[in-house]
Image: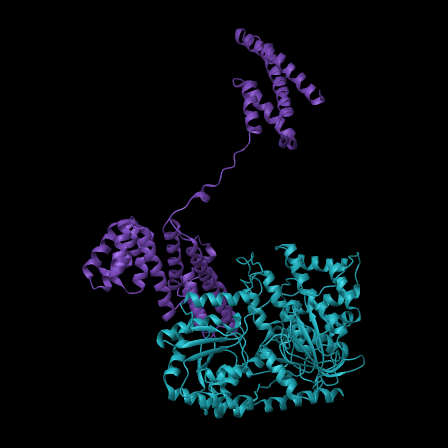
Chain colours: A purple, B cyan
Amino acid sequence: MSRSNILRWVSVATLAAFSVLDLALIGAALAYPFLTFMFVALLAVRGALSALGSVVHLLGAPQQVSSAKVPFLLFATLMHFFVPVVGFVGMSAVLRLGLGAQRVEEAPAWTSFSFEGEALPKRTSPKQRSITPAALEDLLRSQRTTPDKRFQTVLQIRHLPQKQGIALLKLALKDTSDEVRLFAFSRLERFRNDLEMQSRELTEKLTITDGPGKPLLHLRLAEAYWEIAYLGLAEGAVLTHALKNAQDHATAACKLRPGSAPAEFLSGRIALLQKDYGDAFGAFERAVHAGYTRLKALPYMAECAFHQQRYDDVRTMLHEVEASGREAAQFQSVVEFWR
Amino acid sequence: MKTGRGPKLRPGEVADVTLLLEGTYPFVSGGVSSWVHQIIRGLPEIRFSLVFIGGSPDKTEKLRYELPPNVVHLEEHYLSDVPKEQRVVARRGDEAFHQHARALHDMLATVGTVASPPSSSWSGGWPSLGQQPVTQQRVPRRVSGFVASGSTFESLAQAAREVLSPGPARGGALAEVLTPVVADMMKNPHGCERDFLFSERSWEMITERYESGARERSFLEYFWCVRSMHTPLFVMARAAESIPPSRAFHVISTGFAGFLGMLLNRARNVPLILTEHGIYTKERRIELLQASWIKDEDLPSETFGGMSGIGHFRQMWIRFFEALGTMTYAASNPIISLYEGNRARQVQDGADPSRTRVLVNGIDIARFAPLRAKRTQGVPRVLGLIGRVVPIKDIKTFIRTMRVVSTELPGTEGWIIGPEEEDPNYAAECHDLVKGLGLTGVVKFLGFQKVEDILPKLGLNVLTSISEAQPLVVLEAFAAGVPCVSSDVGCCRELIEGSSEQDRAIGTAGTVVKIADPEATGRAAVELLKDERAWYAAQKAGITRVERYYTQAQMIDRYRAVYQSALGGNG
């Protein structure tokens, strides 16, 4: 038997003896409260008992406690002393469980959370909020700013949302300074390349996928082409081509999985950009029918109605937006316009 | 060094001119290589020695050009060359070398420099080394490692111009600190390299500079950044030791080749001529700003110097190449560019204005003029992009342009004529883009072809590059009777619209559009293809312009004069 084990058994035996004495003293103190010495004896025995109990716990404690022996002993002794009801047994159980039990590693809740629909707004830092697209545009357009300053401006564009940033980068492509132009070009190419690579990978996957995964791949491909168009990375015939591809894939997604709200909604937005207002309106209606938030679809539906010259419908839809209360704040100016 | 390919000079033999060629002739084809080939062939009386500097030997498997008989020597050096066996022995390091290197870095870090006089008797009227000590004024700047952070465009040299008053002493300061470093490196290049890699003094210097300028960043990143940045310089020092004697050196860029030229100029007291086609420092800067291998973890909080928003290590690399440029300009005379815009840029980057000059390129008209007769009647519905399939040529914009053109003019083809080996990933992306845009069969990749075979079949020569100087392919196409639609880069506008009033009176030889604009490029191409009168007018203007201003004979005469001046002064 090792030395620490002998020490542990001796401590436990002594503890048991003191515990008996402790109980006897408690009994005596309850029976004869006028005997002051009995209280003093009780406190002394409890103190000794608590300290001894702490030592026993320390001997049986896990390895990680060894780096903080003194705080542990102090803590355990005080707990033993001031928790007479739970007492030694209760404390043993608590410490044993608390220190010895294996911790369960749980996956953070956010990693297992997923949802369909629009992305959450990105968090912006105070610094980012201080950069406005209009201010950067002024700097880029000004004839008085030095190339160095304009280059700094192009660097700051990275803090803007993509769509606004891309519009400014396209403006910077006309700059007289080579560096400004070329840096803007390289940033735009990076955006384009990312989306093109995404399209290539999804297209490859689509050719080897069959069954339930296919509608989602079509939807993702539609989104990739849509991004190229929506962000302003294509113009003219290239834009037309991107929108056509986006619509083809969105339509395929809708056909393969009827009643898919995100696919119908995206199809509506693509059709809207293609100026197919009737198709767009129909797609938005189907999206709402499939569960898409009506309030979010209404402004787009109103836009379709406007282009179709159904002005009464526009008013009705925007009133509906207004009536929905606080959530409609972002459309307030549009509603005001139509009053 | 790789040996065995090409001719070799025997010990004691001397070349007239040694061309220092980084990543180009004779192992890489392209505009600069064609130009080098033209110069060598056009000056048969000059004995040329070629020193090729490459990244690694596996990319230079074969010679792309047949070497003319007046090439008397060829040797290759690779930046990836490290001694095969290196015994790591603890060493204190040479105190003097480190003191000199420290002084050079301090100067490059705190104050820019203007070009110093070349160390040859052919000094263009400039005082020789150290003749006029300069009162060095320092611009307070935060030192960010071996090279300093500072403003983005106003390079170190520009900063120097602000603090050093003009006068005969300009440029002396850099020469003073550069000379002892060169002397140390040339005396014992291997020893200096070992000192840099393994000595305590080197370690002290790195840690000291890290503490003073980069301590918030990862030391490991900093350490390896400094090492990988400087190691090629010792490869250049070893090369300088082995290069055969020459009466003049001619470097075609700044960068590592420029650094080698500077070493040779200082160590051997031989003239150094610099011809920059593009501006190396600018091109490196753009590459580095895009490079994904440099981490920018510290981006959001980075606001020192004038480069706020550019990560620390990225700045170090940019500054490094700027410093190489500054040192090359300091040693070169003359400093040649191809058009006024680039000359201005060289001056902005530290070249002494009085040593700069513009010598435009020219082409062999006799080679291209007969191609006009081979053209068929009418305007072929073929757009050709002649160039390597690499990002700087922006092949993707050409492909997108073809989407626009084929929508407007179905049946029109787009040919991409150039090798794809240099950047296979980019080439693959281009092929994918063709498929993605539904242009299979419309856009064709023809690989490397003889321009004489291709030019008669083209309706338009299209150049979508994002950076050029004076592209030979535009001149060649003009001479062959093909108008051009080009992005507004380098001197393309001058080539297409004319530079002087007299030149502009000739008319426009095509259309200039802004970079990365497929819609505008496509529209311009369609307009020219549809309107035969406009097309023929552009053809005529191109032919007249190239025959009047851009002939090979004119160019060769100018370079003959440059070489005679250099060799005469040294001979």
Q: Is residue B523 left or right of residue A152?
A: left
Nearer-the-camera pick, B452 or A172: B452
Q: Quadrant of the N terminus of chain A?
A: top right
Residue A80 visible here? yes
Q: Residue at x 77, y 68 (%)?
A: B189
Q: Is residue A16 above or below residue B234?
A: above
Residue A146 visible here? no
Q: Give how far across and how far down residue A272 sits, in percent.
A: 29, 62
Q: Give how far across and how far down residue B491 sits, in percent.
A: 52, 82
Q: Is residue B393 left or right of residue A276?
A: right
Residue lying at the far top in this picture: please name it. A31
Q: Give how far across and how far down residue A242 sits, in percent.
A: 38, 65
Q: Residue at x 75, y 85 (%)?
A: B121
Q: Is residue B54 left or right of residue A334?
A: right
Figure disc tally: 0
Q: Quadrant of the C terminus of chain A?
A: bottom left
Q: Is residue A35 above or below residue B196?
A: above
Nearer-the-camera pick, A228 or A232: A228
Residue lying at the far left in this picture: please name it. A312
Q: Is residue A30 above or below residue A307?
A: above
Nearer-the-camera pick, B152 or A9: A9
Q: Give how far across and how far down residue A88 sits, in percent.
A: 57, 18
* Residue B259 image-quadrant placement: bottom right
